[in-house]
Image (tube, helix red, strand yellow):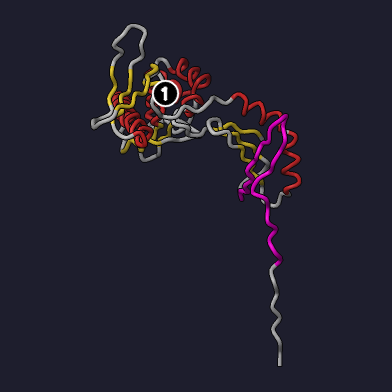
């Protein structure tokens, strides 16, 4: 009688989900994740939340991952120290709308969220939010998204008409890595957070994505096209480089910096 041999698979090592490093008087918790397409170690620091993530290539050891993190602990500490503090959507918070600071004012009772002009010299305009306290953050976010959808749709339509191109859909998202995108089929996606920036920044990003309907690249012809649609392109690019990441602090949604 033949006997079949049962071969047991070697146990898969259990990798720690995080690496703890001490820096100064504090502890930095680094979340570890593996990615099948990663080719090198990569550190990311979420600007708004302070989360630190270390991505590992397949087959790399946790010991080498720790050594990599230790070599870059000063970089991590510096990024964490520079990150802007999150601004929750709550009563009394000051948030920008179309580049102008507004104060969130919560009021009891029913009604719609609305913007009100300042009634006294030196006072800020307000975003008045009726309803329960627990719903303030959601209602402010919904209001800002609605404002963004209106402004972005109008800008996209205007630039599309100028170029004589078709836009099949305009989507409003909360992207982290880029402000917008345009598919080969004409679907445009843009971040609602652009409504927090000055109008010339929003207009530039809308023009940028619409221009991709003619040039699906970032070559010289593309940039000439963008500048013909949005003359303040260079100013908008400079603004985004200087202040863009700060837009992610409002409502405490994350953005990230990276180190490889």
Magenta segment: 10-36
The total number of labels drawn is: 1
Q: Secondary structure at mark 1?
A: loop
**Which residue has dot 1 on it?**
93
Extreme residue toward the top, this view: 121
Residue 20 placement (x, y as % from top left) = 69, 41
- Decide which of 98, 95 is in the foreground and name it: 95
Q: Quadrant of residue 106?
A: top left
83 or 42, which is in the foreground? 83
Tell me if residue 154 comes above or below residue 66 in the rendering: above
Query: Looking at the rendering, in which quadrant would you find the N terminus?
Result: bottom right
Residue 174's x, y, as percent? 43, 35
Can residue 7 be spotted in the picture?
A: yes
Decide whether residue 13 is among the magenta residues. yes
Q: Is residue 158 left or right of residue 79?
A: left
User: Residue farthest to the front?
Assistant: 108
The image quarter containing residue 131 is top left
Spot the residue most to the bottom: 1
Can the viewer see residue 161 in this picture?
no
Quarter the C terminus occupies? top right
Pick the residue in front: 150 or 144: 144
Image coordinates for residue 168, horizontal then vertical, percent: 31, 38
Where is residue 32 shown, x and y percent of the image? 64, 45
Q: Which residue lies at the image location 47% right of the left edge and 32% below the top edge?
A: 252
Q: Is residue 84 left or right of residue 92?
A: right
Residue at (71, 29) in percent of width and height = 74
Depth check: give the residue in front, 73 or 21: 21
> Residue sitting at 62 percent across and 47 percent down?
33
Drawn side of residue 230 relative to residue 43, left or right: left
Binning the other alpha carbons within 10 Å of mark 1 as few (below 14), some (14 to 19) or many (20 upward) gives some
Q: In the rendered structure, does residue 165 fall within the stretch colored magenta?
A: no
């Amino acid at each position: 009688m033949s006997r079949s041999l049962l071969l047991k698979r070697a146990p898969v090592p259990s990798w720690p989900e995080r690496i703890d490093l001490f820096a100064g008087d504090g502890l930095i918790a680094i979340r570890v994740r593996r990615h099948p397409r990663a080719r090198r170690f990569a550190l990311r620091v979420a600007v708004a939340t302070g989360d630190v993530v270390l991505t590992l290539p397949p087959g790399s050891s946790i010991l080498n991952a720790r050594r990599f993190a230790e070599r870059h602990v000063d970089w991590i500490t510096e990024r964490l120290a520079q990150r802007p503090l999150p601004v929750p959507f709550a009563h009394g918070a000051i948030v920008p709308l179309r580049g102008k600071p507004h104060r969130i004012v919560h009021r009891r009772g029913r009604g719609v969220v609305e913007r009100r002009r300042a009634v006294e010299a030196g006072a800020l305009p307000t975003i008045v939010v009726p309803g329960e306290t627990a719903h303030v953050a959601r209602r402010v976010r919904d209001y800002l998204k609605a404002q963004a959808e209106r402004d972005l749709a109008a800008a996209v339509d205007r630039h599309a008409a100028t170029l004589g191109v078709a836009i099949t859909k305009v989507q409003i998202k909360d992207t982290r890595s880029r402000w917008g995108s345009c598919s080969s089929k004409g679907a445009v996606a843009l971040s609602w957070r652009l409504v927090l920036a000055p109008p010339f920044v929003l207009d530039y990003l809308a023009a940028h994505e619409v221009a991709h309907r003619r040039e699906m690249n970032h070559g010289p012809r593309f940039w000439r096209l963008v500048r013909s649609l949005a003359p303040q392109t260079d100013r908008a690019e400079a603004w985004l480089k200087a202040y863009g990441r700060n837009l992610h602090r409002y409502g405490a949604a994350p953005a990230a910096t990276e180190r490889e």
